[in-house]
Amino acid sequence: MKMIETKGLTKYYGKSRGIIDLDLSVEQGEIYGFIGPNGAGKSTTIRLLLGLITPSSGQAAVMGRDCVRERTQILSETGYMPSEAMFYDNLRVKEVIDLSAKLHKKNCKKEAARLYEPTSGLDPLMQKEFFSLLAERNREGATIFLSSHVLSEIQRHCQSAAIIRDGRLIVSDSVEALSRTSARRVEIHGIKQPPAIDGIVDIDCGPDSVRFLYQGEMQALIASLSGLGIEDLSISEPDIEEIFMHFYNGGGAGNGLV
Ligand SMILES: Nc1ncnc2c1ncn2[C@@H]1O[C@H](COP(=O)(O)OP(=O)(O)OP(=O)(O)O)[C@@H](O)[C@H]1O
């Protein structure tokens, strides 16, 4: 069963854009990441899923229930923890999670779906506790929808994810597919400028080294380096933050990774 499904979901606040034409699909039992910068539309989407606001157009369903007509049932079966909950300093993470469940249902183990906007204001130890509790709830059967602007967090804890920017879906896929790229992070010591070939972005020149992202034939890169007096060379996979920054910025919906 689809735990969350939206089709063409759109919300305008007067004339200002909330989200536009959002299609999401979250399977039962997933920990699903929802990634986007500030103002992208993450909270708007969650408020729509909980039926707290009504869409301008399009549909949304949680556990097969319509988010407008069946909002009361959705609220009684879903846990929601907004990021602001973390500002109650004297509550422990577990207490906040359980409180959000108890607000709606006595036995949180039976709870079917949970929506979180969690980690602002959490110190690293609390974050660790938070994610281990989420994993525990997930093992008990809860589907988790985790909204965040921290990509590495999503990469570590989610199976699938959607990336949203300026109110629109950029891409949704398994985290593994989202992290896959042919681009490489290259660091070279002994030169001050990158080699003169195509496919080089994000150049960072040091006094005796240069770092960049390279997308292209490895042979072409190696050939371009010959005779440059290189002392050391390392080639590694870029992390998901770099992939997002350099290969999703400016892309439209449906763009695949490089
Ligand atoms: N009540 C409101 N009235 C008018 N505009 C709003 C309202 N709530 C949100 N917006 C606008 O909708 C857009 C999406 O905001 P939203 O809060 O959903 O983004 P977000 O991704 O959750 O951001 P953040 O990570 O900062 O919480 C923004 O441009 C925001 O200014």
Image (tube, rainbow, N blue to C red):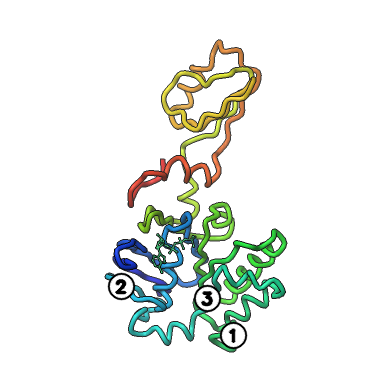
> Label 1's element?
helix
Residue 115, horizontal then vertical, whole percent = 51, 72
Residue at 54% x, 19% y is 193
Residue 21 figure quarter? bottom left
- Where residue 28 sits in the image (x, y, percent)? 46, 72
Q: Are marks 1 and 3 in contact (CB under 8 Å)?
A: no
Q: Which mark is residue 127?
A: none
Disc tally is 3
10 Å neighbourhood of mark 1: few (<14), some, or many (≥20)?
some
Residue 51 falls in which quadrant of the image? bottom left
In-image side of 96 versus 65 (left or right): right
Seen at 53% across and 46% down, the residue is 241
Give the residue at x 45% y 32%: 215
Q: CA distance from mark 2 to mark 3?
A: 20 Å
- The type of residue carrying mark 1 is Lys
Can you give x and y, in whole percent of width and height, for residue 167 in the image?
A: 37, 58
The amino acid type of the residue labelled 3 equals Tyr
- Label 2: which residue? 59
- SS of the residue at dot 2? strand
Rendering quadrant holding ligand 1: bottom left
Q: Farthest left residue? A: 57
Q: In the rendered view, tell whether residue 151 sits above or below residue 129.
A: above
Residue farthest toward the top in the current orientation of the protein = 227
Residue at the extreme bottom of the image, as rendered: 106
- Distance, label 1 to label 3, CA atoms, is 11 Å
| CB of mark 3 near ligand 1 (< 8 Å) | no
Mark 1 or mark 2, which has the lower sequence index?
2
Q: Which residue is mark 1?
A: 102
Q: Which residue is mark 3?
A: 80
Mark 2: amino acid: Gln
Q: Up-down: is 211 above or below 126?
A: above
Q: Quadrant of the C terminus?
A: top left
